[in-house]
Amino acid sequence: MHDPVYSGMPATDLGTEGWEKPWSGSNGGTCIEAKRLPDGRVALRQSTDPAGPALIYTRSEVASFLEAAKSGEADFLIA
């Protein structure tokens, strides 16, 4: 059976409700928006392109990234 939710799908296919900007900076309004899906996965999209692709991650993948970011392991992204 094919999962109708996949990474790279149009974000609009996930609906317009429930998207949040969990963080926003001084980057001129370019933010990442996140949406928790009914099965626990998380969708991310670019706020300036709400109809663009959504990246889909498991709850575990998001938790691992957040824990690593909090401990400094993602600092290389902004160094």
Image (tube, grey):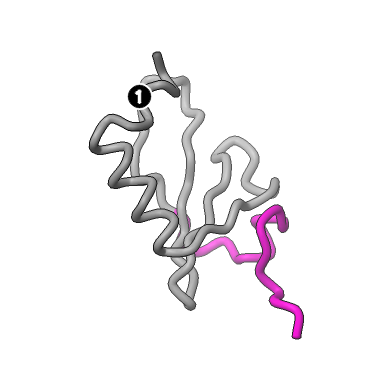
Task: Check disc 1: other Cα within 10 Å, few if <14, some if 14-19, many if 20+.
Answer: few
Q: State left or right for residue 26 relative to residue 8.
A: left
Q: State left or right for residue 47 relative to residue 3.
A: left
User: Quick check: is 36 in the magenta stretch?
Assistant: no
- Circle count: 1
| Residue wearing tag 1 | 75
* Residue at 63% over, 52% down: 54
Residue range highlighted in magenta:
1-19
Q: Position of residue 70 (x, y in %)?
A: 25, 38
Q: State left or right for residue 68 relative to residue 49.
A: left
Q: Position of residue 47 (x, y in %)?
A: 54, 40
Residue 36's image quarter? bottom left
Please identify the residue farthest to the left as the structure is shown.
71
SS category of the residue bearing label 1? helix
Q: Main secondary structure of the magenta part?
A: loop
* Residue at 39% over, 13% down: 79
Please identify the residue farthest to the right as the structure is shown.
2
